[in-house]
Image (cartoon, helix red, strand yellow):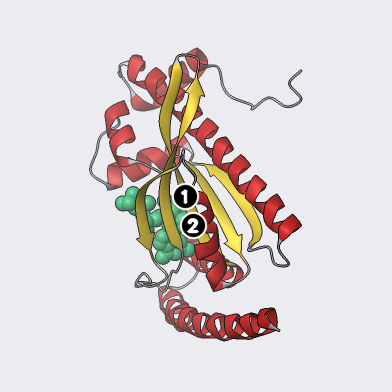
């Protein structure tokens, strides 16, 4: 018995609807895309299970669980097409497969800085996981002050015809980095705030990013000391 079904659209119905948006377009590409989209969703479930299993193990065996919480999201087709255009590609199944690796994304929020590497290592050393890309915005923050560790990892998804390696983006960040990114994201998409105010807030946020980093480093030291005792 299946307790909960994903509310996936029927592929013929969605191809029909998308062809209205994209005009005179070969819908076989759309079909391929939606099959791939569902495959990526299955990949996120595989990683979701892996992370939940690690979470239970840490909870049971250690006196500290590095995982604070996790969030999973699927990129909306609209945002995906926008990202593809930003990278200079027209919509095609191959362009998506070769350039967009965050169709499925999982965000892992950790308590402390060192927890990020603990979770990364526990996940990437699993024999069916392949690390495809690693972007360390913690050692090298973005000009905005954004900090997080981004991994693109792949896992086999068992389709009706056999296994297929499937990419999922995993963003790892501390509670502090997450709070910062949420506020900065809000500022980025606020259109009713005056430009001068946005610039002022952006500068403040940039400073807060390094201040938060300093605070998190200091708190890590206290935590390590208490753990040793
Ligand atoms: P959403 O809604 O999160 O999906 P690539 O060229 O493909 O390797 P990519 O993915 O284009 O790299 O860019 P990047 O910068 O490595 O990662 C993009 C994602 O990181 C964003 O997702 C955000 O979630 C986050 N991010 C990156 N920079 C910032 C920043 O300055 N501020 C905040 N708040 N978040 C940031 P998307 O795709 O924008 O959207």
Q: Residue at x 64, y 26 (%)?
A: 7
Structural crowding at the residue carrying mark 2, measured as other residues with C-alpha within 10 Å and reported as few (<14), some (14–19) or many (≥20): few
Is 115 drawn above or below residue 61 in the view shown? below
Q: Count the marks: how many?
A: 2
Identify the secondary structure beneath mark 1: loop
Q: Nearer the viewer, residue 80 or 224?
A: 224
Q: Quadrant of ligand 1?
A: bottom left
Residue linked to disc 1: 125
Provide residue 80's location: percent of width, then percent of height: 40, 40
Residue at image mark 2: 121
Tags 1 and 2 touching, CB below 8 Å:
yes
The residue lying at 30 percent from left, 31 percent from top is 91
For disc 2, does the CB lie below 8 Å from ligand 1? Answer: no
| Residue 18 as seen in the image, left or right of residue 123 | left
Q: Is residue 78 above or below residue 188?
A: above
Task: Evaluate whether residue 191 shows in this view.
Answer: no
- 42 up-or-down from 110: above or below: above
Q: Using the rendered view, name the quadrant where residue 102 is placed.
A: top left
Q: Nearer the viewer, residue 19 or 144?
A: 144
Residue 42 spot, x, y in % from top left: 54, 31
User: Relative to residue 101, is residue 162 depicted above or below?
Assistant: above
């Amino acid at each position: 018995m299946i307790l909960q079904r994903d509310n996936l659209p029927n592929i013929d119905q969605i191809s029909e609807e998308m062809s209205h948006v994209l005009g005179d377009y070969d819908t076989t590409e759309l079909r391929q895309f939606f099959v791939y989209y569902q495959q990526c969703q299955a990949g996120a479930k595989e990683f979701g299970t892996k992370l939940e299993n690690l979470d239970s193990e840490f909870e049971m065996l250690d006196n500290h669980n590095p995982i604070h919480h996790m969030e999973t999201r699927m990129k909306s087709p609209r945002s995906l097409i926008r990202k593809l255009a930003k990278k200079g590609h027209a919509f095609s199944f191959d362009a998506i497969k070769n350039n967009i690796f965050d169709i499925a994304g999982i965000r892992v929020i950790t308590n402390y800085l060192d927890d990020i590497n603990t979770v990364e290592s526990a996940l990437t050393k699993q024999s069916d996981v392949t690390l495809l890309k690693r972007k360390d915005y913690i050692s090298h923050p973005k000009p905005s002050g954004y900090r997080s560790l981004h991994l693109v990892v792949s896992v086999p998804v068992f389709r009706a015809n056999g296994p297929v390696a499937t990419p999922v983006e995993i963003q790892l960040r501390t509670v502090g980095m997450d709070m910062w990114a949420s506020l900065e994201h809000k500022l980025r998409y606020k259109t009713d705030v005056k430009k001068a105010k946005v610039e002022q807030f952006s500068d403040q946020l940039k400073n807060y990013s390094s201040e938060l980093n300093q605070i998190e480093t200091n708190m890590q030291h206290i935590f390590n000391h208490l753990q040793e005792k």
